[in-house]
Image: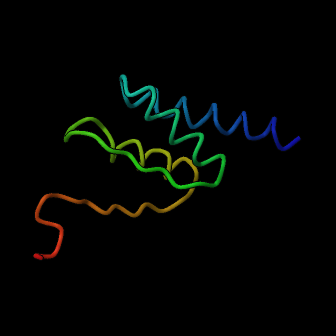
């Protein structure tokens, strides 16, 4: 069944994340669920909390490519 296969893939992705990242349980779960649902995920937080690492690990494990768009206060065009 597809549901059983998805659970297995989700468990493998979560195990890879848990091996590399301590904490960030909500972010790890959200990214795995987004991938399984074929949806986008937006990860927001302060610097140094493994946002990019989560995306890179899930991408690598799923055989996908990442696209990172970093925003900061100077990103917007002047008004």
Q: In the image, residue 27 lies at what x, y percent? A: 43, 35
Picture coordinates of residue 8 (x, y %)?
A: 72, 34
Q: In the rendered picture of this protein, how many numbered marks are placed on residues?
A: 0
Colour convention:
rainbow
Q: Quadrant of the C terminus?
A: bottom left
Where residue 60 appears, as percent x and y from the top left, is: 49, 51
Q: At x 10% / y 76%, what residue is drawn?
A: 78
Q: Is residue 39 above or below residue 21?
A: below
**Left or right of 2 in this view: 42:** left
- Considering the image in quadrants, where does the N terminus appear? top right
Q: Quadrant of residue 4?
A: top right
Q: Is residue 76 left or right of residue 37?
A: left
Work out whether residue 11 or residue 76 is closer to the camera in this orientation and state it: 76
Q: Residue at x 45, y 29 (%)?
A: 26
Residue 10 sits in which quadrant? top right
Residue sitting at the far front? 79
Considering depth in this image, is 55 or 45 the residue closer to the camera?
A: 45
Of 26 and 5, nearer the camera is 26
Q: Residue at x 39, y 31 (%)?
A: 20
Q: Residue at x 54, y 29 (%)?
A: 15
Outermost residue to the top: 23
Vertical relation: 53 (above or below) 64: above
Residue 64 percent location from the top left of the image: 54, 59
On the picture, is 36 further left or further right than 67?
right
């Amino acid at each position: 069944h597809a549901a059983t296969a998805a659970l297995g893939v989700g468990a493998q992705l979560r195990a890879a994340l848990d091996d590399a990242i301590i904490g960030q349980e909500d972010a790890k779960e959200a990214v795995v669920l987004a991938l399984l649902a074929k949806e986008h995920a937006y990860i927001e937080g302060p610097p140094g909390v493994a946002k990019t690492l989560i995306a890179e690990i899930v991408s690598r494990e799923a055989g996908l490519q990442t696209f990172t768009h970093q925003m900061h206060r100077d990103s917007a065009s002047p008004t």
